[in-house]
Amino acid sequence: MKTINIGVLAHVDAGKTTLTERILLETGIINAVGSVDKGNTITDSLELERKRGITIKASAVSFWVGDVKINLIDTPGHADFISEVEHSLSILDGVILVISAVEGVQSQTKVLMNTLTDLGIPSMLFINKMDRLGANYSKVIEEIKLSLTDAVIELTQISNEGCPDVAIADRQIDIDVWIERLSAHNERLLSNYIENVTVQDSELFTELCVQTQGARIFPVLAGSAALGIGVDRILQYLRQFFPVNLHHEEHEEGPLSAIVFKVEKSITGERLAYIRVYEGFLAIRSEVDIIRTDAEEKFSFKIKKLETLELGGRTSVSCVYSGDIAVLFGSDLRIGDILGQRSDRIKVIAFQEPPIRIQIAARQIEDTHRLHEALEDLTAEDPFIQYAQNAVTREMSIKIFGDIQKEVIEETLKSEFGIEANFSNPEVICIERPVSTGSSVEFIGEAGNPFYATIGFRIEPGAAGTGLQYRREVELGSLPLPFQRAIKDTVEDTLREGLHGWEVRDLVVTLTQTGYSSPVTTAGDFRNLVPLVLMEALDEASTLVYEPYHNYFLRIPESSLNKALYHLTRLQATFSDPIPEPNGYSLQGALPVRNTDSLKQILYSFTGGEGFLSTKPGEYYPIEGAPPEKSRSRPNPLNRKAYLLHIHRIIQ
């Protein structure tokens, strides 16, 4: 069997779901095209998607083009749902990137294109809405070359753009242009051209297919998804521009290698896991090894029910082979779980965690436990929501990317779970990092140590992005294993609230001293003593508070340069020297997350509507001046008296 797994990506409202509907119509999956605005599309199946007219969840559907099965993933376009896009990208063989002929290249278009090129995913660009008033093909082509990539080759020519009579035809091969583009990765072409060796059109097209599959060149098509114009060309080129997965069922398969890229609940409440199979096969009633990378955990899972995508729906099968999409039922699999063994073909998608935290509480107190369960379910479907419940206060919070995501969660809780919830104002999540080295130790029987335990720690700064590195200078066998676990777990828990109340990251914590008195010492002695010693070491090391920044790309007209520099300075952004471009300048730099919305709100006014802003999660930078203090959920161990009183009450 031959398969291709493709995605449809775009900035919101560029027409990607409409294109998906038209493709399904052309391939016989549906009898009529749905409308996002009317809420009757096949891939936007959530009630919330139908109400809002936007794609929220990545949907999967399949169809056939000749003898090739195409699994199509229709993904969200809004920046708040970038996690869904990232999950989907990890399993794709190719992408159709949709760009509106009216709005042109937009902020999220650039973010998506950068990700596609970074990951080396083959892509074709489709300029949509050529029938709409204001469509401007030439302008969009220039924006693509300026903002996305100049490694493009146009395959269509347009007449009567901007009206329902728009017509699309094949563009004749311009040998000079094609050789100029393709010779960047094929010197033989350029050499033959210079030496007047005849280069056939078929040879150029074959080279175009090779370089497109290698993500070195990007073909550009145009049309109107709403009218079905140009969609036939997309279908024609799928097998030529994207690599085809070949599988022969009669041949012996190698070891299994697959990954979970999507988790959802069925209408019956059963959990479904969507899996891309890279090597080997999944078989009904077989036992499969699971690698959970974030938890460094391995376990096994027995397949009781197995389906695959087929003709717009799903069908039960006994096996799903390499290159295809499998659906497992009733499992506790999570997004990112690897089935079988790791493979170099599995793309690891890494991106920053959500920079905003919101407290959430049930409006009706009796719904509190149901809210907790609902948020756990939503986290299983999208782990980057990052739901947490404070072990002490029982307060619930979620980490998100933006306001749209918060509104969607609020409406989902109401419509799917029947729960009304209150949300706090968003809080930008800062972190603390140690400045220098600090150490502390307390011994059994020492004055002021009421616990039957000896503990010593040394804290040192770690490299940015390394998180917590826990090490031991004591022999592993010097303490019973339950005591070792209690120490490590308490270190991780204590560092969730540093000197200023923020989580402490990017540090090395070394266990330097241990001791206990058998049989009176318990794991609780270590759990209670660790915060006292660890925070003393952290206090000696001291910390700085860091806040999250977005990396941004800003393009402005020439007349707006001074205003742009003024506003960027006012919003505490860093910026590069302005780079001259046709009709204006571009600027790049870093912008505090807390000020990003402010820049988005004023951009239109100070650029006369001609400004272009693209942002993506960046690094953390130290806060100048007095650091913001975060309220603590429990007594600070540095206030020894209050801490010991709190512990005494718990023990009593």
Image (cartoon, grey):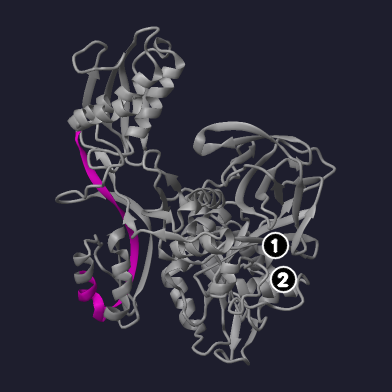
Residue 430: x percent and y percent? 29, 49
Name the residue that disc number 2 marks: 24
Foreground pick, 646 / 490: 646
Secondary structure beneath label 2: helix
What is the three-letter code of the residue carrying label 1?
Answer: Val
Disc 1 to disc 2, C-alpha distance: 9 Å
- Give the extent of the magenta segment: 542-565
Give the residue at x 37% y 10%: 520
Name the residue that disc number 1 marks: 61
Residue 95: x percent and y percent? 59, 62
Dominant secondary structure of the residues highlighted in magenta in the image: strand
The C terminus lies in quadrant: top left
Drawn side of residue 430 relative to residue 641, left or right: right
What is the three-letter code of the residue carrying label 2?
Answer: Leu
Give the residue at x 36% y 53%: 355
Q: State which quadrant residue 390 falls in.
A: top left
Drawn side of residue 157 relative to residue 479, left or right: right
Q: State which quadrant residue 578 falls in.
A: bottom left
Residue 538: x percent and y percent? 23, 31
Badge 2: residue crowd in 10 Å (few <14, some 14–19, many ≥20): many
Callout 1 touching callout 2 (CB < 8 Å): yes
Badge 1: residue crowd in 10 Å (few <14, some 14–19, many ≥20): many
Foreground pick, 460 / 611: 460
Give the vertical position of 556 relative to 162 (above or below): above
Residue 494 in sight from this viewpoint:
yes
Residue 530: x percent and y percent? 31, 24
